[in-house]
Image (spheres, rainbow, N blue to C red):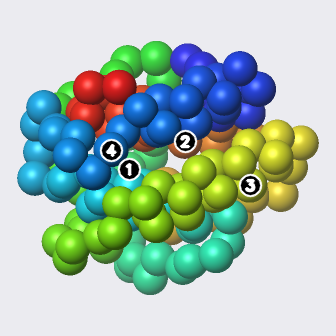
Amino acid sequence: MKSLFESETHQDILNRIDKLNENSQADWGKMNVGQMLKHYQLPIEIALEKREMNTKVGVLKKMIFKFFKPMMYNDKPWRRNVATPKEFVITETQVFETEKNILETLISEFAAKKDNTNWPKHPIFGYFTTEQRGKMQYKHLEHHLTQFGV
């Protein structure tokens, strides 16, 4: 699995985002391109400690999520229409250029943390290593950029 911490991969992601425009259409899902750009900002903001996700997870769910945790960063692509946590569902209209610029800035800020060893605890899955974080962020971006055909 590629990682957002790899310089070439980071640049490739930014180039693919630049291929999007406000008329880009999704091959699946309910979000339009502006909503997708906003949606992706939320988990990266959590990783950068710019946003908190106040999700309470019980013991049983923690055990279940522990089983699914490797799927966040392994080599297998996420399936289409995978469930989105309600905190990450974007239904409001978004300004494409604004959301695109914010996302590109956040991605570059995240990529610059490739030597970070002190990541915050993920609100659902617990702790990830730096390697796992880079792969997880890449995998989520790959999922949505593929969704929009870039």
Can residue 86 be seen here? Answer: no
Q: Indicate which label's residue lies in the foreground, 1 or 2.
A: 2
Query: Along the horizontal axis of the image, is 6 left or right of 34?
Result: right
Q: What amino acid type is highlighted by mark number 1?
A: Phe
Q: CA distance from mark 4 to mark 2?
A: 22 Å
Residue 45, labelled with which disc? Answer: none
Asked if 150 appears above or below 36 in the picture, the reply is above
Q: Determine whether the residue tagged by mark 2 lies in a helix, strand or loop.
A: helix
Mark 2 or mark 3, earlier in chain: 3
Residue for point 26% across, 34% down? 148
Front position among marks 3 and 1:
3
Using a 10 Å C-alpha cutoff, classify the residue at mark 2 as few (fewer than 14 neighbours), some (14 to 19) or many (20 or more).
many
Query: What whole-number distance in Å separates the C-alpha atoms at marks 2 and 3?
Result: 12 Å
10 and 58: which is toward the camera: 10
Which residue is more in the foreground, 39 or 58? 39
What type is the residue that disc 2 sits on? Gln
Q: For the point 68% across and 64% down, which residue is it? A: 48
Closer to us: mark 4 or mark 2? 4
For mark 4, what is the residue?
21
Amino acid type assigned to the residue bearing label 3 in the image:
Glu
Element type at marker 4? Answer: loop
Residue designated by label 3: 109
Q: Which residue is mark 2?
A: 137
* Label 1 secondary element: helix
